[in-house]
């Protein structure tokens, strides 16, 4: 009798173990980079014999308050969470307008008795915060005496560090970081560069800042003509403003 029940238990656990192994749910984040203000999509993949046609219940939970976010397509907040179904073997949760409250939280998908969860961990995932117009300050400062144009840009809030280049006619200069502070997940950063007016007077110079392939700032300024250079103070043996210093040494 004891042996008989042992055999039964053994067979039952063996079969359920096989189905357990083949039917599980995998969870993934669709985006390689989480962009603040945009949509982040979580994907729950059904494995093995699981299929949405089973009619089991689908649920997403988690987030800042660890609550139900969507149940069988019904969202707890339609402006924030939306379920999307594209095939029979996966269901997705779109988190709209991704923000700081959504970051670094756990998200769990449940299908029938199976579940899986993932953390939107910004220490491990790439992310971007593209600053708005009000968070960007740009300046072009023309100094007639030193004959230098200083270009300056500050991003009150952004991530990651931008690449900024100033284009003047045929040349270009990379702007360098002047100051950088971390504020929570983001940076408060400023960059500058100096260009001799001789290289750009009477022409346009353009500052372009980008994050990856995305241009976040493009500003152009027309540098005044250099006529007044002739009127600059002349000291014996040294002439300022010709741009070719060695002339005087001849
Ligand atoms: C959860 O999903 C991850 C990523 O797809 C996968 O590697 C892991 O095996 C899953 N865990 C379970 C218990 O199914
Ligand atoms: C993120 O968005 C949610 C929903 O719109 C809002 O309640 C929350 O205050 C926002 N969090 C931050 C840090 O802006
Ligand atoms: C510099 O020179 C330009 C062109 O002559 C002139 O328009 C501008 O007012 C000057 N700036 C200063 C600060 O003197
Ligand atoms: C960014 O840094 C500048 C200079 O330190 C400061 O004036 C400004 O208030 C900072 N902005 C924010 C949003 O912290
Ligand atoms: C400017 O920055 C780009 C991108 O980081 C780099 O490839 C290039 O060598 C830099 N140019 C100079 C002159 O430093
Ligand atoms: C200008 O003079 C400096 C110092 O005498 C020298 O090193 C440099 O090569 C010269 N430049 C040109 C364009 O002649």
Image (tube, helix red, strand yellow):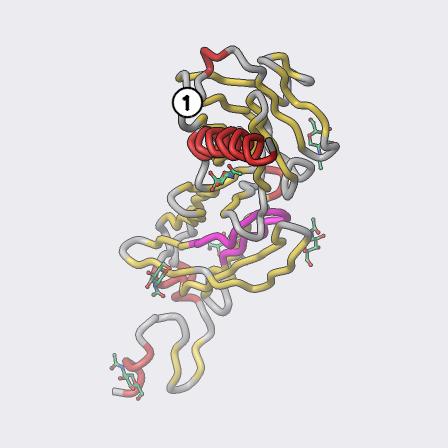
Judge from the rendering whether residue 65 lies leftward or rightward of residue 178; answer left or right. right
Query: Horizontal and vertical percent for residue 166?
Result: 40, 54
Above or below residue 202? Residue 214 is above
- Between 118 and 237, which is closer to the camera in this rendering? 118
Query: Horizontal and vertical percent for residue 214?
Result: 41, 41
- In the rendered image, the residue lying farthest to the right is 65
Above or below residue 232? Residue 37 is above
Q: Is residue 30 magenta?
A: no
Say whether residue 66 is visible: yes
Say whether residue 41 is visible: no
- Between 12 and 232, which is closer to the camera in this rendering? 12
Identify the main secondary structure in magenta.
strand
Write down the residue under mark 1.
Answer: 49
Q: Which region of the structure is painted magenta? A: 151-164
- In the rendered image, the residue lying farthest to the left is 250
Q: Quadrant of ligand 6?
A: bottom left
From the image, which quarter does the C terminus lie in?
bottom left
- In the rendered image, the residue lying farthest to the front is 1
Query: Horizontal and vertical percent for residue 241?
Result: 39, 70
From the image, which quarter does the N terminus lie in?
top right
- x 65%, y 36%: residue: 102
- Mark 1 crowdedness (10 Å alpha carbons): few <14, some 14-19, many ≥20: few
Judge from the rendering whether residue 116 lies leftward or rightward of residue 208; answer left or right. right
Judge from the rendering whether residue 44 lies leftward or rightward of residue 182; answer left or right. left
């Amino acid at each position: 009798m004891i042996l008989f029940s042992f055999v039964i238990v053994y067979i039952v656990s063996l079969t359920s173990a096989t189905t357990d192994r083949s039917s599980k749910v995998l969870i993934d984040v669709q985006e390689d980079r989480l962009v603040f203000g945009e949509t982040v999509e979580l994907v729950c993949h059904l494995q093995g014999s699981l299929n949405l046609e089973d009619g089991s219940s689908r649920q997403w939970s988690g987030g800042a308050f660890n609550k139900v976010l969507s149940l069988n397509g019904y969202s707890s907040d339609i402006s924030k969470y939306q379920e999307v179904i594209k095939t029979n073997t996966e269901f997705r949760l779109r988190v709209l307008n991704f923000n700081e409250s959504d970051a670094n939280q756990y998200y769990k998908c449940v299908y029938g008795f199976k579940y899986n969860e993932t953390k939107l961990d910004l220490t491990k995932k790439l992310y971007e915060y593209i600053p708005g117009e009000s968070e960007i300050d740009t300046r072009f400062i023309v100094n007639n005496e030193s004959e230098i144009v200083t270009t300056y840009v500050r991003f009150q809030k952004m991530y990651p560090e931008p690449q900024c280049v100033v284009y003047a006619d045929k040349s270009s200069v990379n702007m360098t970081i002047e100051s950088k502070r971390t504020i929570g997940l983001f940076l408060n950063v400023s960059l500058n560069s100096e260009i001799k007016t001789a290289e750009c007077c009477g022409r346009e110079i353009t500052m372009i800042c980008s994050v990856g392939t995305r241009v976040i700032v493009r500003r152009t300024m027309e540098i005044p003509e250099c006529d007044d250079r002739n009127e600059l103070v002349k000291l014996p043996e040294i002439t300022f403003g010709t741009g070719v210093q060695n002339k005087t040494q001849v």
